[in-house]
Each structure stands twice: as structure tokens, then as C-alpha cells.
């Protein structure tokens, strides 16, 4: 049965849903407020370079992403590179890219190193992630790695990603992180293998957009949505109303009640209870490199950003006209004042920290500096998270909500987003949906 499906939100989730529902034979309209599709994967121009606004990598084990690249004819453009990892602690920069460097890592004693390695290995082999949802991440890490290692390594890293919200997070958070990154290793803790597509996500989004157009998906960009109403219908900010058989909202969880005002009080409470982290991410184009690490983890509390991401340690410099692209992300609570801080103040704070971390760095090396900010990036995986999360179907007939909050056994990345789109498109197929509705069942995330 062919249906008219409206999808609100043109990020990779919305694009992937449009792609899948169109392949099922439905009439699909994709509605996006921004002038272009892509969301968090969007690219921008910086110092004459066009690249991703936020940092991304593709792993060889990212099966859903690899499948999409093949469908778009971009698999031949994929490049995989062995990268190195840095660690900035006690005012010094260390390399921790292989087993020997790990054993030599001065901040930890031999016993602490053994327990840290055991923690990572154990997490990589755990299968029952739901059991970990019942255990605070701090408690679980302290138990496996020891108090010293937790306070020296894990706690600063948790704070850098989750702030004080780490106290609310479950052990499933670190499990999901280790699971994905462990898949990037060829064997044990030896070699990291990350990848990218030539041209970055700008190339992927350009090809994906053309594919959607060729397949007959109606793309409505620069169309902010006022609300999703019964009917179901989408009321645009322009005053235009679009009617569908089904509407799927892909906005972040805190925005769902605002876009779907007809939800019940209980539904609103469940969506509003999902707490998100935001991000303030500086992108720098430099004349010289900082180091040779793709990622430098930071445990020093005085550093104003979460990590140093040097894309040139992964991506061929030819992509950047021989220059160096660096990201300085800072993850913050969705109400953190930094989200509204002036660009000048952030620039001064970040550059001063780089000068202190890298003695050879000079501000004259900075060819471009821009800041991207997003209020809602990923949800905090709190204790019992999956048990309290709303399902896909709302109480309004024909209206669904699916978003990053539904990634319950992984971390937010493109591969998990594509997997979520596949899971929803399969579970919400008309014939299955009608069968479930006849049994008074809501479509769940299981």
C-alpha cells in the first residue's frame, strides 16, 4: 500500500528514512529548515577549505555506512588510514598508540595499566548492555580499573564528554564507546584504523541529495516547521499546510513536544526527561601541524576544550590545499552559558590553551578560526535509560517521533544513525504497522 509520508528534519536520519521509504514505493516529502540537507554532518567553507563542520570518521566495521557508500557509488572514494592517539595529562603530551607506549605511559603504574587494559578488554567482550544500564558508569569503572586509574584517567574523560552529568550516566555509555573504538583496531590494543571519503561529508551529502531527487523524493529545504498536527499534517512557518498519511519527526527529543503540541501530558514528560549534551566546536585551519595524533585526549581541567582532533593526521593534506585542519570540541550541557559566549572570548580562551599545550604553536599559524554550536547533540545515557524512553509511535494517529535518543546501545555517530533509520523503516512498514496497531501495540525500540 502506497502512502504519503512526510519526514520533518533533513539530517542524515531524515535523509536515510526518505531513502528507505521511497524504496518501499511510498510518496516521500523531506522537510528541512536549513537551506541544505545534512544536519550535524553538514560541511562549510573555512579558509578556502570545504570540509565537515564537525569531525567525523568512518570505520571499516561501520557496515551501514559502508553499505550507503556502495549505494551512492562512493565506496571507491573511501580511504582507510592507521592513526595515532595522544594523551595530554600532567602538563605533558604523550603518545599512547600501541602496546609498548601504553606500558611506558608514566602517569600510571604497572598495576593501574593492567587494570585499565583489563577494563577495556572486558568491556569489548560484554554482550548484555542492558545489564550495564543499571550500574553507574563511575561505579563500574572504579570497580574494574581501580580508584587511582578512575580519578586520573576515566573521571576527567567522562567530565570532558558529559560534564557533571557523568554522575547520572550508566556503564552502558562507556561500553558503547569502547565497543565502537575497539572495532577500529586490527588486533587487541595495537593499531587504529580510521577512514574517510575523499571530499568529506560534503561529497557524501551532495551525492545523497542527488540520489533522493533522482528517486523522486520531494525535498523542501528552507522550510521551518511550525507544528505537526492531527490529520496528520505539517504546518510550515510560512502558513502552508502539508497533509500526509504518516508524519515522522526526527528532531532531538527536547524539541519533540514543541513540534507536536498535541501529545499527552505523559508523553511530554517522557520526552522532556531526556537530557541532552550540546557542543561548542572550534575549527582551525593552520599553517603548521600541532602534533601527529588524530585525537589527543585531555585530562587537565584547565583546558577549555574536550580534545584536540587533527584531521590532517587522518586525511590527505591535498584535501586541505596543504594546510592543516584542527577541531577543538567542548561538550557542554544544553543550558551551558558557553553556548551563548562571544566568539572573541572563545577564540582567546582556546588559543591561549593551545599556546600552553604546544610550545611551538604561534597564533600567526592560524589561517582561519570559526565556531559551530549545537544545543542538542546526544542524550545522556542515564540509569535505566532504555526502559524510560518513549517509543516511536505517538498518541496522535499517523504521527511518529524517531531521533538520536533512540540510539540506546551505541554512541551517536553516522553508522548508528543509519542503523536506526533501517530499524525504524523496517518496523514501521505499513503492513507490519497495521498488524501491530490491530493488537494495540506501540512500535518499540527493541
Image (spheres, rainbow, N blue to C red):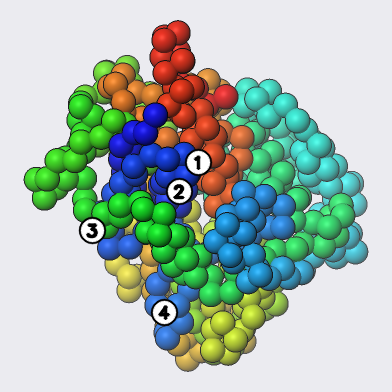
Nearer the viewer's eye, disc 4 or disc 1? 1
* Left or right of residue 139: residue 107: right
Per the rendering, the mark at residue 46 is 4
Going from N to C along the chain, the mark reached first, 2 or 4, is 2
The quarter of the image holding the N terminus is: top left
Alpha-carbon span between mark 2 and mark 4: 30 Å
Q: Which element type, helix, strand or loop, lies under badge 1?
A: helix
Q: Is residue 391 visible?
A: no
Alpha-carbon span between mark 4 and mark 3: 22 Å
Image quadrant assignment for residue 81: bottom right
Residue for point 57% across, 24% down? 446
Disc 2 packing (10 Å; few <14; some 14–19; many ≥20): many
Circle 1 is placed at which residue position?
Answer: 421
Alpha-carbon span between mark 4 and mark 1: 31 Å
Circle 2 is placed at which residue position?
Answer: 19
Going from N to C along the chain, the mark reached first, 1 or 2, is 2
Amino acid at each position: 500500500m502506497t502512502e504519503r509520508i512526510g519526514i520533518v528534519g533533513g539530517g542524515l536520519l531524515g535523509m536515510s528514512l526518505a531513502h528507505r521509504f521511497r524504496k518501499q514505493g511510498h510518496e516521500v516529502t523531506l522537510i528541512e529548515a536549513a537551506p541544505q540537507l545534512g544536519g550535524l554532518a553538514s560541511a562549510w567553507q573555512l579558509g578556502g577549505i570545504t570540509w565537515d563542520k564537525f569531525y567525523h570518521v568512518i570505520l571499516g566495521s561501520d557496515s551501514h555506512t559502508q553499505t550507503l557508500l556502495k549505494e551512492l557509488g562512493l565506496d571507491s572514494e573511501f580511504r582507510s588510514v592507521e592513526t595515532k592517539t595522544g594523551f595530554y595529562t600532567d602538563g605533558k603530551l604523550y603518545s599512547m598508540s600501541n602496546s609498548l607506549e601504553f606500558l611506558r605511559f608514566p602517569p600510571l603504574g604497572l598495576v593501574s595499566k593492567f587494570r585499565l587494559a583489563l577494563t577495556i578488554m572486558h568491556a569489548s567482550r560484554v554482550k548484555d548492555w542492558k545489564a550495564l544500564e543499571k550500574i553507574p558508569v563511575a561505579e563500574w569503572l572504579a570497580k574494574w580499573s581501580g580508584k587511582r586509574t578512575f580519578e586520573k584517567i576515566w573521571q576527567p574523560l567522562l567530565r570532558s564528554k558529559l560534564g557533571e552529568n557523568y554522575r547520572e550516566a550508566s556503564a552502558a555509555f562507556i561500553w558503547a564507546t569502547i565497543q565502537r573504538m575497539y572495532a577500529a583496531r586490527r588486533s587487541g590494543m595495537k593499531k587504529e584504523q580510521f577512514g574517510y571519503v575523499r571530499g568529506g561529508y560534503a561529497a557524501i551529502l551532495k551525492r545523497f541529495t542527488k540520489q533522493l531527487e533522482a528517486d523522486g523524493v520531494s525535498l523542501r529545504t528552507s522550510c521551518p516547521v511550525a507544528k505537526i498536527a492531527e490529520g496528520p499534517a505539517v504546518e510550515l512557518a510560512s502558513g502552508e499546510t502539508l497533509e500526509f498519511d504518516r508524519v515522522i519527526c526526527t528532531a532531538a527529543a527536547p524539541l519533540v513536544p514543541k513540534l507536536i503540541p498535541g501529545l499527552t501530558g505523559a508523553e511530554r514528560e517522557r520526552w522532556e526527561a531526556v537530557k541532552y549534551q550540546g557542543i561548542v566546536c572550534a575549527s582551525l585551519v593552520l599553517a603548521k601541524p600541532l602534533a601527529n595524533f588524530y585525537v589527543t585526549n585531555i585530562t587537565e581541567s584547565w583546558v577549555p576544550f574536550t580534545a584536540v582532533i587533527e584531521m590532517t593526521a587522518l586525511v590527505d593534506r591535498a584535501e586541505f590545499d596543504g594546510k592543516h585542519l584542527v577541531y577543538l570540541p567542548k561538550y557542554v550541557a544544553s543550558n551551558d552559558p558557553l553556548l551563548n559566549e562571544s566568539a572573541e572570548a572563545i577564540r582567546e580562551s582556546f588559543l591561549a590553551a593551545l599556546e600552553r599545550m604546544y610550545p611551538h604553536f604561534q597564533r600567526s599559524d592560524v589561517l582561519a578560526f570559526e565556531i559551530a554550536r549545537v544545543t542538542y547533540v546526544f542524550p545522556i545515557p542515564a540509569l535505566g535509560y532504555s526502559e524510560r524512553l518513549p517509543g516511536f509511535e505517538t498518541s496522535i494517529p499517523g504521527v511518529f517521533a524517531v531521533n538520536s535518543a533512540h540510539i540506546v546501545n551505541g554512541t551517536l555517530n553516522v553508522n548508528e544513525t543509519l542503523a536506526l533509520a533501517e530499524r525504524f523503516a523496517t518496523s514501521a512498514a505499513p503492513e507490519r504497522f497495521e498488524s501491530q496497531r490491530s493488537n494495540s501495540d506501540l512500535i518499540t525500540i527493541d
